[in-house]
Image (spheres, rainbow, N blue to C red):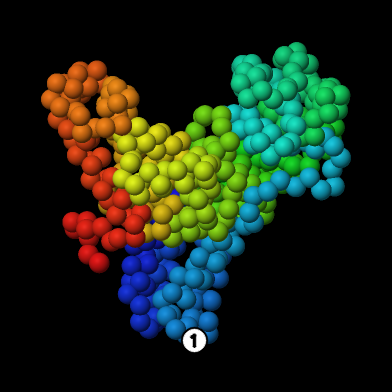
Amino acid sequence: MFESLSQRLDTAFEGLRKGGRVKESDIKSVMREVRMALLEADVALPIVKDFIKTVRGRALGEEVHKALKPSEGVFKIIHEEMVAMLGEAGRLNYSGSAKPHVIMLVGLQGSGKTTNGAKLALRLRSEGRKPLMIAADTYRPAAVDQLVTLAKQINVPYYEEGTSAKPPTIVKRGLKQARELDADIVLVDTAGRLQIDAGLMDELEDIKRIAAPAEILLVADAMTGQEAVNIARGFNERLGITGLILTKVDGDARGGAALSMRAVTGVPIKFMGTGEKISADTLELFHPDRIAQRILGMGDIMSLIEKTESVYEEEEALRLQSKIMKNEFTLQDFLDQLQKIRRMGPLGKVMGMIPGMSKLQMQADFDNEEIEQRIKKVEAIINSMTPQERQHPRILKASRKRRIAAGSGVEVRDVNELLKQFKQMSRLMNQISRGKMPNIPGLSA
């Protein structure tokens, strides 16, 4: 979501990275570039002005002049102020509300309330909670059916009365059902409109009065742009929202909506939703420090570790390490690791979490769709092999390669290329596991 902003800021910081004494003219030049980068990313003008004013004031102060490396001091200030602008870390707050704790999801039509409500229910259940979903959107075509389908898919209880009853009445009876089922969290999927109107807000206020929600989360499309500010302000003034869920953050969004909505409402971004797939890893907790690091090209090692831990068991990781050290890493192991990496998300996104890799990623012009097609080709080739061939690729002679190529719909040269890459990778992994510095052409020490 923040790729374009990150690229612009990377250009702005180019002069600072050279080190040495930082002059007032240098700071003004950097601030000018940062200002343009934020505006181009759709951050609202008043927010940009406040940010630049604060950073400039601190950058021209004593903390930079006294720093051993003034350029790093300026960079540190920008990072700290960006974290402050992004707000606190995402977490749900149930204090002051009785069980079942109600989470009310609001937003415009098409923002992704129902889908992300299901993702949140799945996440809460994985944390040991007992959620129940209420279908209170009786206006959007098939909204109730969608909620019922998703609730069944993730095996979470739900309450619905179709589209005939009034939403406040449905919520009242749904809460009664939740108590009978001993649910401790209730997610209320409310109706949206194409734009904010009085009727929508009156109905939402009635639901709020009945449900006494612990959280009122505005579900907002990250690709909305400048209009996001007006949407957030409108819902906040009438309902007093407590947090934000940004959806479609993996799309072609400039990222300014996130910064603007957070600053205008004063409430934290709690979650970020990616894609339509209903799974725990497509609704991420919001970490402002990690997002700021990504924006500034510093990577996001913590998120990468968490993603890795979600697909690797400790025992399995030790077993894999042992096989690599003994030079017993097979094509079947290679296929297993490929499939695990795919579960971590798009490769471009994973690379962006590694410090220093975001710039390399831009230079390489990473195309996630192209990479996905290549991975599928590799999977097809390996799946066309017998178990014995995967374990001992040395037995793959010409006739076997022709059979594998025909079975996977590729050319024999594709099979040869995969075997060559696998051999090189196995040798490299073995050297690294033994603490040796591998000899990689094109890389200097």
Seen from the viewer's position, the closer of residues 112 and 291 is 291
Question: Eyeballing the image, is 87 above or below 56?
Answer: above
Residue furthest left as drawn: 398
Q: Residue at position x 65%, y 19% from top?
A: 152
Residue 316 position in % (x across, y down) = 48, 41
How many marks on residues? 1
Residue at horizontal 20 percent and vertical 29 percent from the top: 395
Label 1 crowd bin: few (<14), some (14–19), many (20+), radius 10 Å? few
Horizontal side of 70 relative to 166 (left or right) equals left
Instruction: Please state the horizontal and vertical placement of residue 171, each as a whole percent of the image.
Output: 80, 26
In the displayed structure, 420 sits above or below 385; it is below
381 and 58: which is toward the camera: 381
* Residue 81 relative to residue 198: left or right: left
User: Residue 65 location in percent, x, y?
Assistant: 47, 85
**Residue 391 occupies quadrant:** top left
The amino acid marked with disc number 1 is Lys
Residue under pointer 1: 66
Asked if residue 423 is positioned above or below residue 75 in the image, the reply reads: above
Q: Residue at x 85, y 32 (%)?
A: 210
| Location of residue 110 (image quadrant) | top right
Quadrant in the rendering for residue 27: bottom left
| Residue that appears at 67% across and 51% down | 267
Give percent across and percent down for residue 392. 26, 32
